[in-house]
Image (cartoon, coloured by chain):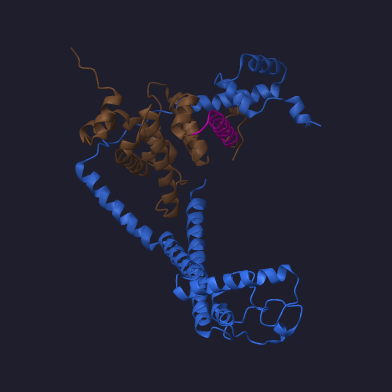
Chain colours: A blue, B brown
Amino acid sequence: MRNPFVRRHPFGEEELSAYLDGRLSPAESTRLENHLASCEPCRRHLEELRAVTEGLRALPSVPAPRSFALRPEQVEARRSQTLAGLGAWAFGPTGAAAAALLVFLVLVGVDLGTLGGGGAPESAENRQAVQESYNAEMPALSAAAPPTAAAAPAPTPAPAPAGRAAADEQKEVGTPEPTAEAATPTEVPPPAAPPGTAGEGGDTGRWVLRGFQGAAGAAFLAAMVALVWQRRRGRGVGRT
Amino acid sequence: MQATAPEDSRLVALSQEGDLAAFNALVERYQGQVYNLCWRMLGRREAAEDATQEAFLAAYRNIRRFRGPGFRAWLLRIAANAATDELRRRRRRPQVSLEAPFSSAETALDLPDPSAGPEEWALRSERARCIQAALLILPPDQRVAVILADVQGMSYEEVGQAMGSSLGTVKSRISRGRGRLRRYLLEQGELSPPGQRPTQ
C-alpha cells in the first residue's frame, strides 16, 4: 500500500529538479504540470528549488588571483616529491603491511615446500617407497585377506606430514614396529605422532617456522588495522 | 588579421610531448574555471590557490594518459579531486576552520555587480554569502555536481564526464544537493518572503 503522502505528491525532489533543467520527458513534464496546477505545496517546493538554482547561477565568477602557469622548477620539484612520497609509503603502515605480508607468504612457501618434500632426495625416496608398498598391498586388500601385522601400517592413505616421514620410511624399509594397533585385526593407520615425540629435529623446526608465520601474520593484521584506522580517520574528518 | 588561438587538441598533443609552454597555454585558458571550482568547493582563497596549483601539476604529470575527448571535463575532474583532497587535508590539520565565518577579504570575492542599487546590492551580497556558506555543508560529491551544473553552467553530460559518473548519478547528486541547499536556506530564512523571516 502506497504512502498517502506519495499518493498526494507523486513527484519527488529529483523529478522537480530535473523538470527545472528540462530533463523530464514531454509526457512526464505534462503530468507534473497537471499536478502542479492543483498542488500548492509542490508549486512552492518547485519555486524554492528554482530560487536555489537562480541564486547559484547568480554567484559572481571569482577571478584567479594570479597565474597558475607551471615553472620548470615546479615540475622538477614534483618529481623529487614523488620519490619522497614513495619513501613515506614504504615506511608507513602500507609499506609495513606489504612487508609483513611478503614475509608471511615466504614463510608459508617454505612450510609448504617442507611439507611437500622440499625437493630433498630422501623425501622423494620415501614417497616412492610408500607408493610401492601401497601397490604391493592393494591386491591383498582387494581380496579381503586378513591383514597381517607387517602389512598393516603400510597403506598410508594420504601423504604423511614431514614430521612423520622418517618414521614411515623406517617402516617401509621392513622393520615395522609391533605396536598394539598393528597387532589388532581391524587395523587403522596410527595417528600422527605428536610434536616432539617423533622426528624431533624436523618438528621443532616446523613449529619454529609456524611461530614466525604467526608473528608475520599478526604483524600484517596489525599493519592493516593501522592502515584502515588511518584511512578512516582521514576520510571521516574530510566528510562534511 | 588576428591569429586564432590553437585548439585544445593541438596544445594537448604538444603537452604530451613535454612542451611546457603549450601546457601553460592551456593553464591560462582554464585557470579561471579551475580556480572558481576550487574556490566554491573550499570557500577559502588560500586553499583554493593550493588546490588549483595542485590540479595543474597533477594534470601536467598525467597528460600523457589523456585520451580525449574533452580536455576541460578531464581537467575539471582533476580539479575536483584536488579540491576534495585539499578539503580533507585541511580538516586533518585545521589551521583555519573551513566553517568559520568569512573574513571581509573572502566575502569581498562574492560581491555582486556594483551597478545594482545599494539595497539590491546588499541583498544580493547577503544571498551570495549565504549560498556559498550553504555549499560548504554539502558532501563533496554533491558539492562538485551542484557547482559544475549550476555555478559553472555545465550540462548533465559534461558534469558526468567531469565526475566520471553516469547520468543517473549526476541527476541524483544535483537534486540531492539542491534539496539540501533549499532546506539550509529555508532554515536561514533566505527563501522566505521578507515578512515571514524567522527572528533569531
Q: Is residue B87 above or below residue B125?
A: below
What is the quadrant of residue A28 in the picture? top right
In which quadrant will I find the C terminus of chain B? top right
Question: Furthest-top residue in view?
Answer: B1
Q: To which quarter of the image does residue B189 belong?
A: top right
- In the rendered image of this protein, does residue A35 appear above or below residue B103? above
Q: Is residue B39 visible?
A: no
In the picture shown, does residue A87 fall above or below B158? below
Q: Which residues are magenta?
A: B165-186
State the quadrant of the N terminus of chain B: top left
Residue B86 magenta: no
Please state the horizontal and vertical placement of residue A133, each as a whole percent of the image. Answer: 60, 73
Q: Residue furthest right?
A: A1
Magenta stretch, overall SS = helix
Percent position of residue B167, x then y: 53, 28
Magenta stretch: includes residue B178: yes
Q: How far across and down, in percent of the image, does residue A12 sit?
A: 66, 28
Position of A143 with respect to B79 (left or right) is right
Q: Can residue B54 be seen?
A: yes
